[in-house]
Image (cartoon, helix red, strand yellow):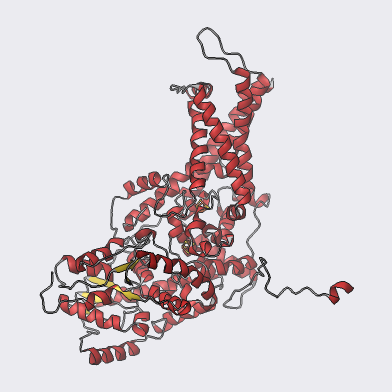
Amino acid sequence: MNELDAKHPLDFDAPRFSIKKPVVRSDAQGELSDAERVDRAMKAFARDMNSTTAAYLESCVHCGHCAQACHFYVTSQDARYTPIWKVEPFKQAWKREAGPFAWLTRTFDLKPAVTADELREWQELLYDSCTMCGRCSMVCPMGIDIAALVGLARHAMFEAGLVPHELWAVAERAEREGSPLGATPKVLKERIEWLEDEHEVEIPLDKPKAEVLMTLSSIGIMKYPSSLTALAKVMKHAGYDWTLRSDGYEATNFGMLSGNLAWQKALSLRLINAAIACEAKLLVLPECGHAYGALRWQGANLYGKPLPFEVLHISEFLARAMREGRLRTRRPTASLTYHDPCQVSRRGGATGAAREVFAGLKADLREMPNGGDANWCCGGGGGVVTLHRADEHRRRAFAIKMKQVVESGAEKAVTSCENCRLSFDDGQAHYHWDRKMGSLLDLVAEHLDEAGTGPA
Amino acid sequence: MTLLELARGPVLTVALLVFFLGTAWRLWAVFRRPRKPDYSAPRSSDTVGGGLRAIWQRMLPRSAYERIGMTGTINAYAYHIGIAVIVFAFAPHIGFIERLTGLSWAALPDWVTYIATAFAIVGLVFALATRLTDDVQRLLSNFDDYFTWIVTMLPIVTGMALIEQTYVPATPMVAPATPDPTLLAVHLLSLELLLIWFPFGKLAHAVLVFVSRYRTGVEFTRKGAAL
Ligand code: SF4
Ligand code: SF4
């Protein structure tokens, strides 16, 4: 440093206009060398690569359309949050190691080999900045399912031991204890006893046989216990033979969100085996988006054959009960809007189910602008809500959601995902917003016409 | 051997070989990967229909996603359609294809191609300008994007030089003038460069688009999700 500099040191840490100091934030698990991390990541990525994902990696024309669909890009205007950029190291690795002209790429060193530092840098893009909501996948003119690529890249990151630690710890706990939030079978049993006493409802647990196996999200058990009472009321009213099982109740799958395929499978198998054990014909997933994706669309593939029972999301189940005339309901007085959980609607194909429930309730439904399949994500899916270091980013994205809810003009908002409700609660507290996100199941339970005078 | 003979003979043969074999190889790299069976109970079994619908629907602007820049979309229409008209509807090009394959069809009047050329050029220039100025596109872009742009533009520009040469009002009385052989050779060589580059770079999206859209269409339709 010369004399002038010594007298006038540059202060790189002070906040300044338009220059952002890049924050390098990455966690690591295990004692692995950089080379091992890269090697494991690449092997895992190659292992899960199929013909469709290969087509995706070959097809991008770098048009950038996907950026405009992503809440994280839209609210930051930072090009790094462009959806397809989030899988850039894997695109690069594909071209260099496995693509059609990999030999040319390597021989002439046209694309550099991916480094552990790059993977560390991308941790923030693959986890903190992607809810796997699939909005980007809908606008890509090449039809690339970018969200699926992010899922694949997360497998690689997990193998490399490069997962945000909060998410890793939650997933590990889920695998070890059966619940990510400490809703162990013992806690569940205590909750049930308490709720049965408090609300005079019956919540069957561990019936040896039942037609319907109901499952829960530990977010519901721990944060929204009224969902259990609502469930019991609806099931009694509709007259179903149902049970909860202490050997398979937790439907959230943090194994999937963190990128650990083995944990994902272990968690799904608990539900599958519980349903088989009680000879259930139907397994109903709770108000949780990713639980639906995990079991409804990926469960059978991890099981290795078709599931011997039907799987429905609770919103589909309610819609069916209404269709079959099992629910007598009263009309809600307030106008309502519905926040589509990405994994149930856009990614899950059950967009119509909640609408059927609203129609059954004869509710005054006011759709949000871009509601339904094009709905904006709450910002907390894909495990993002568990990452405190992503709070600022997530809350910024939530601003879009607030606008959308307000523009619907509805008095009340409901959704069918407890993870979404968690992000809404956080956003509400952060912005001192006067809106609360309710639950579709609670709404139905509150409007059951027990006297039997309403429309069936 | 003159430059024109070279361009019409061996170079053309090599270019066509690289084009077909390279493209087949690139597709093979995709198709040879495993396709795991999906055991989840499908919501809809019309997956082939869904795949085809996705190919069509992703060609249309998406009204539910109003933030997605319409300018870029309209511009993409402009140069894609422009280039298609130049390649497939211009009489000399149909003649070229006929000499190669024996297939021919009716051409559109020359002035249509001239308008299409204007659209293609303006569109491509606009696309490049966006690529250079838009943060997102600039970040995503690499050598492939810029080289592909040059390789696409060259045949258009060299072709325009030929239009100057041969422009003769189309009347039965006047035979078209023979184009300058060097200019024609350069035009042909620029096309051959495009054919050779096609399998290696992003031009291959012209075939890959059908694969990725179809596959997404199949998977989304299986789930009953919107395309
Ligand atoms: S899946 Fe959603 S959050 Fe992730 S990149 Fe795409 S639009 Fe953004
Ligand atoms: S929209 Fe599709 S083709 Fe365009 S940059 Fe994004 S992923 Fe690539």
Q: Identify the residue shown where x is 17% and y is 65%.
A: A323
The answer to whether residue A175 is left or right of residue A191 is: right
Nearest the eye: A407 or A56: A407
The answer to whether residue A1 is left or right of residue B193 is: right
Nearest the eye: A279 or B64: B64
Residue B130, relative to residue A149: is it above or below? Answer: above
Q: Identify the residue shown where x is 39% and y is 62%.
A: A375
Horizontal and vertical percent position of residue A83: 51, 59
Horizontal and vertical percent position of residue A76: 55, 65
Q: Is residue A308 visible?
A: no
Nearest the eye: A97 or A28: A28
Residue A235, relative to residue B201: is it above or below? Answer: below
Q: Return the residue found at the far right.
A: A3
Residue B70, relative to residue A26: is it above or below? Answer: above
**The image quarter in which residue A288 lies:** bottom left
Q: Is residue A181 visible?
A: yes
Horizontal and vertical percent position of residue A81: 55, 62
**The image quarter in which residue A192 lies:** bottom left
